[in-house]
């Protein structure tokens, strides 16, 4: 009789521990590596994701030119944002990593400006289905350094 009580208690404790462990474990975010270089190029121009998926974007600046001349960042904009207007305003926003304070609400996620051989990252949940532009907002870079996050 005692053995049966102990085994049923052990079973209940084990079941509770397993259920806690299963709910406590979350999938790691999917990592997307983007490299940037002195030729003002991102290594990728498209990212696909599912709505609500957790993404970790890692930006590596492979360049050798000084940060002040050829720094790179990653700025994911909300749907419908005027990219030209954002980038134009960003040109004078050096103190805020080239994200204009008046347009901070247009940004879903960003990585600060990275100098040569530096790496930065950001983790975020993919927004609702749609297309979202990402750019390097360092002055003059966005025309060549841009891409699209497509969320399905």
Image (tube, rainbow, N blue to C red):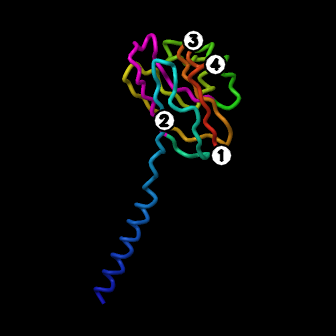
Apparent side of residue 114 relative to residue 42 in the rendered image (left or right): left
Label 4 sits on residue: 86
Quadrant showing the N terminus: bottom left
The residue indicated by pointer 3 is 91
Mark 1, residue position: 152
* Residue 48 badge: none
- Residue under pointer 2: 57
Q: Which numbered disc, 3 or 4, marks the residue that appears first in the sequence? A: 4
* SS under mark 3: loop
Q: What stretch is highlighted in magenta?
A: 56-77
Front position in the image: 104 or 29: 29
- State whether residue 16 is above or below residue 98: below
Label 2 vs 4, first from the N-terminus: 2
Q: Distance between the residues labelled 1 and 4?
A: 25 Å
Which of the two labelled residues, at mark 3 and mark 2, occupies the earlier sequence position? 2
Q: Which of marks 1 and 2 is nearer the N terminus?
A: 2
Neighbour tally class for label 4: few under 14, some 14-19, many 20 plus, Cα within 10 Å? many
Query: Where residue 7 appears, x then y in whole percent?
Result: 32, 81
Q: Earlier in the sequence, mark 1 or mark 4?
A: 4
Q: Distance between the residues labelled 1 and 2?
A: 18 Å
The reply to whether discs 3 and 2 touch (Cβ–Cβ < 8 Å) is no
- Magenta stretch contains residue 72: yes
Question: For mark 2, does the 10 Å Cα neighbourhood hold few (<14), some (14 to 19), or many (20 or more) residues?
Answer: many
- Between circles 1 and 4, the one closer to the viewer is 1
Q: How far apart are marks 3 and 2 (CA)?
A: 23 Å
* Image-quadrant location for residue 84: top right
Q: How far apart are marks 1 and 3 (CA)?
A: 32 Å
Seen in the picture, residue 152 relative to 94 is either above or below; the reply is below
Against 87, is 7 above or below? below
Which quadrant of the figure has residue 116? top left
Query: Could you say whether the residue bearing mark 2 is in a helix, strand or loop?
Result: strand
């Amino acid at each position: 009789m005692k053995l049966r009580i102990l085994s049923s208690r052990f079973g209940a404790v084990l079941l509770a521990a397993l259920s806690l462990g299963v709910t406590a474990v979350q999938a790691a975010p999917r990592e997307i590596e983007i490299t940037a270089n002195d030729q003002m190029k991102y290594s990728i121009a498209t990212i696909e994701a599912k709505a609500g998926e957790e993404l970790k974007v890692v930006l590596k600046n492979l360049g050798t030119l000084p940060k002040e001349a050829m720094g790179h960042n990653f700025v994911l904009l909300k749907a419908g944002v005027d990219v030209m207007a954002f980038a134009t305003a960003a040109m004078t926003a050096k103190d805020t990593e080239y994200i204009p304070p008046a347009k901070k609400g247009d940004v879903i996620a960003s990585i600060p400006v990275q100098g040569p051989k530096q790496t930065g990252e950001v983790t975020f949940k993919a927004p609702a289905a749609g297309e979202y532009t990402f750019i390097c907002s360092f002055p003059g870079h966005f025309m060549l350094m841009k891409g699209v996050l497509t969320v399905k």
